Amino acid sequence: MTAKNISLDRYKQRFFGDFLELPGLTEIAVNRPGELYTKINGVWEQHAVPLSYEDCYNFARCLAKHHGDNIEDIKPGLSATLESGERCQVIVPPACERDTVSITIRKPSKVQIPHQSYIDAGFYNRVTGEEKNGDARRGINCIVQYKKYSSVYGEMRRVR
């Protein structure tokens, strides 16, 4: 793929290129000059890098300009996507520590999980609270069905 924004691609390659190619990498985070973290197979690792505040801010401005946006003290947050598909979040002062630029780059997952797998694993039970409160809710439904209304209030308080 040929980059449309050569400046942005050069910044990306110069600052993050070697890390973006690491097998299993899902995320890169820069929270202060000279420190870069990689998340590979769920494990964070710190790396010392020659990345200055100015480098980070220049990357942020270039990314914002590429998306027809800006990033500055009156608009200190930017969400954007690199041409290669990685999602970026960038924060500048005053929304973060002075003399820092927070950059997070997330690589898209190469794993496709079918919707049925979420259902089979009980994902929606956790989301709806059914996993935790399912028995109590079923009990309440029985009380209502058999018109044992005096018991409903106590059961409802227990479920909450």
Image: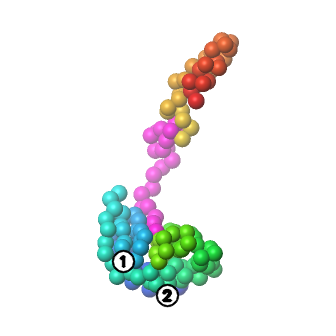
The amino acid on which the numbered mark 2 sits, given as a three-letter code, is Ser
Q: Which range is magenta? A: 104-126
The tag on residue 34 is: 1
Residue 9 seen in the figure: no
Q: Tell which residue pokes out farthest to the bottom in this image.
A: 6
* Residue 5 placement (x, y as % from top left): 53, 85
Q: Residues within 10 Å of mark 1 (few under 14, many from 20)?
A: few
- Horizontal relation, residue 46 to residue 105: left or right: left
**Image: 96 above or below 152:** below
Q: Residue at x 32, y 68 (%)?
A: 46
* Residue 113 placement (x, y as % from top left): 45, 52
Number of numbered discs visible in the structure rendering: 2
The tag on residue 7 is: 2
Q: Nearer the viewer, residue 32 or 126?
A: 32
Q: Tell which residue pokes out farthest to the front in this image.
A: 98
- Horizontal relation, residue 47 to residue 108: left or right: left
Question: Marks 2 and 1: which is nearer the front?
Answer: 1
Q: Please say whether residue 107 is one of the residues in the magenta stretch.
A: yes
SS type, badge 2: helix
Q: Nearer the viewer, residue 49 or 16?
A: 49
Q: Residue at x 59, y 78 (%)?
A: 72
The amino acid on which the numbered mark 1 sits, given as a three-letter code, is Gly
The tag on residue 21 is: none
Residue 158 seen in the figure: yes
Q: Residue at x 53, y 29 (%)?
A: 133
- The quarter of the rendered structure image containing the C terminus is top right
**Which callout, 2 or 1, points at the residue further toward the start of the chain?**
2
Where residue 136 sits, quadrant-wise, is: top right
* Residue 105 placement (x, y as % from top left): 45, 69
